[in-house]
Image (tube, rainbow, N blue to C red):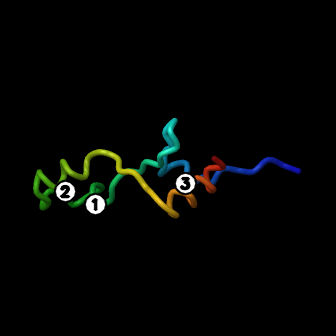
Amino acid sequence: MPKQKTHSGAKKRFRVTRNGKVLVARKNRAHLLEKKPSTRKRRLAGPTEITGGAAKNVKRLLNQ
């Protein structure tokens, strides 16, 4: 039986830490940044953790 393939879209968007947490970049940070306040842009800067059933689905797509 052939190996399972990693979902190409998922591997570009998500990252799994050593402890098994799923991290993803926040939305609303790609374009139209001129009209958004600096505080909002800073809040959206870092990655955020995905929890619950969504994290389980992402790990399945990444073959973790």
Measuring 51% from the left and 57% from the top, which residue is drawn there? 55
Q: CB atoms at circles 1 and 3 under 8 Å apart?
A: no
For mark 2, what is the residue? Answer: 33
Tell me the SS state at disc 3: helix
Between 41 and 33, the one lying in front of the other is 41
Tell me the SS state at disc 1: loop
For mark 1, what is the residue? Answer: 28
Chain-order first, disc 1 or disc 3: 3
When asked about the image quadrant of residue 33, the answer is bottom left
Residue 11 in percent (x, y) is at 55, 48
Question: Please, which residue is most extreme toward the bottom here?
Answer: 53
- Please say if 63 is above or below 36: above
For mark 3, what is the residue? Answer: 10
Residue type at mark 3: give it.
Ala
Compared across the picture, whether 29 is left or right of 52 comes to left
Spatial distance from mark 2 to mark 1, Cα to Cα? Answer: 9 Å
Q: CB atoms at circles 2 and 3 under 8 Å apart?
A: no
Chain-order first, disc 2 or disc 3: 3
Spatial distance from mark 1 to mark 3, Cα to Cα? Answer: 19 Å
